Amino acid sequence: MSHPVLIVDDEESLRRVTQVRLQKAGYLVDVAASAEEAEEKLARRSFSLVLTDLRMPGASGLDLLRRIKADYPDIIVVVMTAYGSVDTAVEAMKAGAYDYLTKPIDGDALLLVIGRALEHVKMREEIQTLRNSLDQKYGFENIIGRSRALLYTLDVASRAAQSDSTVLLRGETGTGKELLAKAVHFSSRRKDGPFVAINCGAIPRELLESELFGHVKGAFTGAVNHKKGKVEAADGGTLFLDEIGEMPFELQVKLLRMIQEREIEKVGGTEAIKVDVRIIAATHRNLQAMVEDGTFREDLYYRLAVIPIELPPLRERTEDIPELVNHFFARAKQRLGRENLRFPHHLMPYFTNYRWPGNIRELENVIERMIVLARTDEVSLEDLPDCMRRATGPSAGSIPIDIPEEGISLEGVERELLLRALQKADWNQSKAARYLDISRKTLIYRMEKYGLSKP
């Protein structure tokens, strides 16, 4: 066993007996005859656990316990006390002792308490390792890309992480909204709390309220037990509401109350339950247009959009594509057992010139597909999807555009292009999307953004 233990007792015989017992059990053991000697040893080497007597000449075991908790908070302390001095042991527990043993020390009880205490140390270390790995996996620094559009988004998100304000992530499908939500959570003061996600568009509307707020036994047919909802599960942490634009209108008022009052009621219940939850919502839809249409509550929208953050589509950060390709390629070929597979440089333009209507999610799927289908140790053009190999059409450079000296509105140009494509296609959305080399879903998103609809 690798956890070193320090025994502190002024009785030499008890010190020696206890040392031998723990050494026979496989522990690394050192001893000290006083609290002062123990402090010297603590300053020179690290220990996982200190087993100390409470009554000693000079500084007491209680004094030593308090100093350890102040200077070495990760060390677990178990105290020993004479039979009949349980009050002192209780005082030690209040001061931070893990457990206590009464003298004369029973050998089996000693090993049980020490084993349980060091198992607690091991569990604590494993939890810290897991937290560190989550921090590394979901930190802002691990979001791939250095384009100006992405760096601006990450700058806003990193500043938002320092507060408890509600965040609204807006962006097309596949742009990485949940990944960014996790980065905000794991960079915030709530990072040790839970991160709970729920997709409001993936759960039937009649079940969504129960999923969010929970229900009491007998609330409806099939409710045979009490159930904790996602909001309660996220207490002390972050609740990620993905596709918030799909939430039924009648449920939006209950979410608004939860945000305002910091309390919920279970389905079928009457008791208000207080919750401490930070909300991060995400949508690919234009919520402002939905507010105007009356399909999304205006008061809820302004509660959610305290800090709105736009995630740029992949086509607006083409300089990030090579780095993303290399990252996903290296990760996927290892996972799929094709470590020797090579990606030739001459294929990269096919990735940078493609429009990626499905964004990063589509890119990752394309890379996995070509790794699986590659016939040799090098990816070839034939391994790419037809849409990437056959994508042709005039480039932006071949379209005559005059930029006046006073400048031009990029959004205005985009709106005009959308409008012309829709008019040319007689407002057939699929046809207009083909004219613009985007998906129909992307077209609809842009139409909602600019308020375009068939006359």
Image: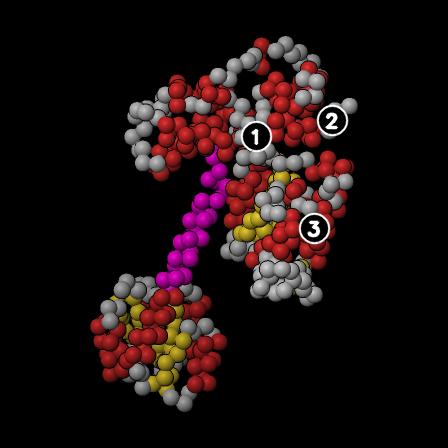
User: Mark 3 falls on what kind of element?
Assistant: helix
Residue in the picture at 41% in, 30% down = 369
Q: Which residue is mark 2?
A: 453
Q: Is residue 380 above or below residue 445?
A: above
Please give the range of residues in magenta. Answer: 121-145
* Classed neighbour count for the residue bearing mark 3: other residues with Cα under 10 Å, few (<14), some (14–19), many (≥20): some
Instruction: Name the amino acid, label 2.
Output: Ser
User: Mark 1 falls on what kind of element?
Assistant: loop
- Report the magenta stretch's main SS: helix
Q: Which residue is mark 1?
A: 313
For residue 44, say whether it is visible. Answer: no
134 magenta-colored: yes
Whole-number angstrom distance, CA of label 1 to CA of label 3:
30 Å
Asked whether, in this view, residue 155 is left or right of residue 379, the answer is right
Q: Position of residue 160 (x, y in %)?
A: 60, 45
Whether pointer 1 and pointer 3 mark residues with C-beta atoms closer than 8 Å, the reply is: no
Q: Which residue is mark 3?
A: 251
Instruction: Name the amino acid, label 1.
Output: Pro
19 magenta-colored: no
Whole-number angstrom distance, CA of label 3 to CA of label 2:
28 Å
Q: Nearer the viewer, residue 274 or 335?
A: 335
Residue in the picture at 57% in, 30% down = 313
Q: Which of the two labelled residues, at mark 3 and mark 2, occupies the earlier sequence position?
A: 3
Q: How is the image coloured?
A: secondary structure
Q: How many marks?
A: 3
Instruction: Name the amino acid, label 3.
Output: Leu
* Classed neighbour count for the residue bearing mark 2: other residues with Cα under 10 Å, few (<14), some (14–19), many (≥20): few
Whole-number angstrom distance, CA of label 2 to CA of label 1:
23 Å
